Amino acid sequence: MLDERVFRRKLRCTVAQLRAVRVEENGEPLVDIRRGRTELRVNSSVDPHLQAFTGTTLFARKEVVRRVHLANKRIGELLPGAELLVWTAYRHPYHVVSQFVGALAIARRMNPELTYRQAENVVDPFRSVPDISPHATGAAVDVTLVINGKDGKLLPPKNDEDALKHRTKFHPFSLDVREFVRKRRLALRRVMLEAGFAPTMEEWWHFSYGDREWTRFYKQRVAMYGPIQFVV
Ligand SMILES: [Zn+2]
């Protein structure tokens, strides 16, 4: 079940709409996401396939990192004891392709009537279509909360099948979760938006700055960041 406001606002972009957004790459570097004004918590078990490209460090565009730290500072003021925990940021395009292929196979098995183009829209943005992937640009972060040093109980999907079967549970305004969970999701959303990020209507944990989704959400002329091949 979803809050009806979500339907009224209809913010979700289709793959075709995102492809239509022009990118003027600004060349900003990727930096270690911990490099900022706050002590930022990061995922300590980075996906081994992603480690093949960037090791155990999480990277994002410089301005994205600055804004994540702003949100991290603000969340403690809004929810006492709360801190952000970043579990994914930049993903190498090859990694994005492998995740997309896995989820596409599951989506088409679950919905054999779908055409390829329809299946792309089922999978995206959970496992984004590679050419428009926000994570491959270094613009996107997946974040959750830690409260008083403990897991903030904002549970992500267990696997791709769970994500595709129970999609509405993962919407930021979902009424399928307990009240305290929804409040925490909304507090996270609020600090990320205040820091200039755009949300996605499909995933309470995903935010981006400067990519195609951000461009549409804030009605900007062009996106600043396109996919890049970055390795360490
Ligand atoms: Zn994401």
Image (spheres, rainbow, N blue to C red):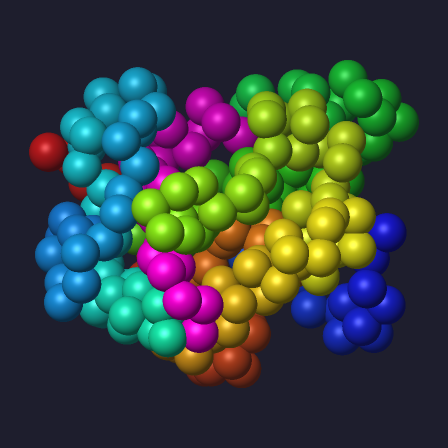
Residue at the spot x=81%, y=64% of the render? 3
Residue 40, x across and y down, in percent: 23, 53
Q: Position of residue 39 (x, y in %)?
A: 17, 56
Across and down, in percent, residue 153 comes to 54, 43
Q: Against 5, is 142 above or below?
A: above
Please report the residue visible at 71 percent of the width from the left and 33 percent of the height from the top. Answer: 164
> Does residue 15 appear in this view?
no
Note whether residue 208 is visible. yes
Q: Magenta segment, which residues? A: 78-100
Which quadrant of the figure contains the C terminus?
Answer: top left
Position of 162 with respect to 5 (left or right) is left
Q: Does the magenta run of residues contain 93?
A: yes
Eyeballing the image, is 154 above or below 19?
above
Q: Toward which corner of the image does residue 140 lie, by quadrant?
A: bottom left
- Choose between 82 and 61: the one closer to the eye: 82
The residue that appears at 30% across and 28% down in the rendered structure is: 46
Q: Nearer the viewer, residue 137 or 24?
A: 137
How many marks the image carries: the answer is 0
Residue at 30 percent of width and 26 percent of height: 45
Residue 204 versus residue 26 in the image, above or below:
above
Q: Quadrant of residue 209?
A: bottom left
**Residue toward you, 125 or 21:** 125
Instruction: Name above or below for residue 58 compared with residue 159.
Output: below
Residue 77 highlighted magenta (yes or no): no
The x, y position of residue 71, in whole percent, is 34, 69
